[in-house]
Amino acid sequence: MKKKSCLKVLSVLVLFLSILVSNTVHAESLSTLKQGVYKVGEHVPAGLTKLSVPSGMADVFVTRAGIDIVWETIDSENIFYPNQITVKLKTGDLIEVYPFSTRTTVQVAKAPAVDLKKMASGLYEVGAEIPAGAYLLDVDQAKNNIYENYIYVYNAQNEIIKELELHPSAAPVEQKLTAGQKVYISELAGTMLFKAKAIIPTSIKLSKTSLAITPTQTYKVTATVAPSDATNKAVTWKSSNTNVATVDASGNIKGIANGSATITATSKATSKVVKSLTVTVSPKTVKLNKTSLTVTRGYASTLTATVSPIDSLDKTVTWKSSNTNVAVVDSKGKVTGKANGTATITATVKNAKAVTAKVTVIPPVAATSVKMSQSTATLSKGKALTLTATVSPSNTTNKTLVWKSSNTNVAKVDAKGKVTAIAAGTAKITATTTNGKTTTATITVPK
């Protein structure tokens, strides 16, 4: 970075001295640049561009949004400095040209497609000229083996996030590049190699850990290879028993006959990375949680249907009652008693044998009496007491009670029988069943 600053200072001095003897030279055409400053989009077209010197030397700077992103000395001899640079120019960029001689010009031309095996000095975009990935950077075709070469990695804001010094005699350097970054190769006379480094998969995750299907059914299982930037994420599929289940190259598993098989996905990059799942093939069946059910008239109970295999297709259950005057059933298996008697509830699933449950509807058992836990109680103001009431017989269908106070200014009661003393006096607390049976307790609140 110090060299960048010094280079620009020297170039400005050259420009100043040349102004003393002649006017600054502006672009004569889109293909030739003399000493001066040129705006991309006006004097020079945007795009992947080659800047070169046919003879002599020149300093070239490219500025983007006020930041120098290229600073390079180019030399026609192409020994100690490159004779050209390749730059992905964008509209609005500024190109500053400082020839070492008034006879030197910088030639502008459309750059050829980038060859990762012969990368020359210049600025390249990752995701455009350079595919994202991990690379081994090797200065393998330098014009000299004396000087080091420099590589700068920019982020999307054109800030340098990595600076590498590469010597032709040194070992290749590994560098990971992501889309949106830029790579500036500086001071390279000759070319270098960007060799993609294979990122080997470390694991495979399958979309199913086990699978249960029917014969002739096909189920697609996906394989996710990690890391996500692995070079080769392809897998091969294999079945341990093709008489039971087969699998194609896309992970489509097909049931053939009853039984079990192991399906294995193996990384094409390394046979050490594998993942398997067990496939069970069986005919479709449906099973109810109860084969008989007793329902009180006017009340409901729910039947549950389980369809196997778990991954089979079309597991919709259709419910039907043999006698809707006695019992009805909805689409979710909820059975409601309508009249005393019996009915058969049938659950049907496509391609499975229907199953049934016998439903008996019985009349509700009415309450014959209700008894309070205590008939009297004395409560101080602000205190509370919970009363309980027992409904008989014990098998009464509806044991719901309604609680009421005869004088809420003295004592109030909630829906659960909790009595709270309010003020001095007497109040009767009554519990009533749904069919009108009652029981009372007298609450006294002293002064």
Image: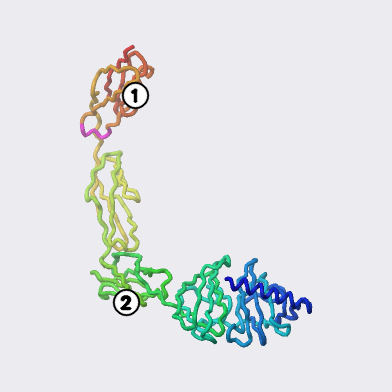
Residue 284 to residue 319: above or below: below
User: Residue 120 location, x and y as percent?
Assistant: 56, 82
Asked whether, in this view, residue 53 is left or right of residue 156, the answer is: right
Where residue 340 sits, quadrant-wise, is top left
Asked whether, in this view, residue 128 is left or right of residue 303, the answer is: right
Identify which amino acid the numbered label 1 is placed on.
Val
Magenta part of the chain: 394-398
User: Residue 218 location, x and y as percent?
Assistant: 34, 69
Do the residues under discs 1 and 2 have CB atoms within 8 angstroms? no
- Which residue is at a point 40% across and 69% down the rendered structure image? 227
- Disc 2, SS: loop
Q: Nearer the viewer, mark 1 or mark 2?
A: 2
Residue 119 to residue 251: above or below: below
Task: Please identify the dominant SS of the magenta region.
Answer: loop
- In the drawing, what numbered circle is on residue 271? 2
- Disc 1, SS: strand
Which of 437 and 257 lies nearest the eye of the viewer?
257
Which of 23 and 248 lies nearest the eye of the viewer?
23
Asked whether, in this view, residue 136 is left or right of residue 447, the answer is: right
User: Residue 127 location, x and y as percent?
Assistant: 53, 73
Where residue 419 sits, quadrant-wise, is top left
Q: Within 10 angstroms of label 2, few (less than 14), some, or many (20 or more) residues?
A: few
Q: Which quarter of the figure is the N terminus placed in? A: bottom right
- Which residue is at a point 28% across and 51% down the rendered structure image? 304
Q: Residue furthest top?
A: 447
Tell me which colouring the rendered structure shows: rainbow
- In the drawing, what numbered circle is on residue 218? none
Name the residue carrying label 1. 413
Identify which amino acid the numbered label 2 is placed on.
Ser
User: Residue 296 location, x and y as percent?
Assistant: 26, 39
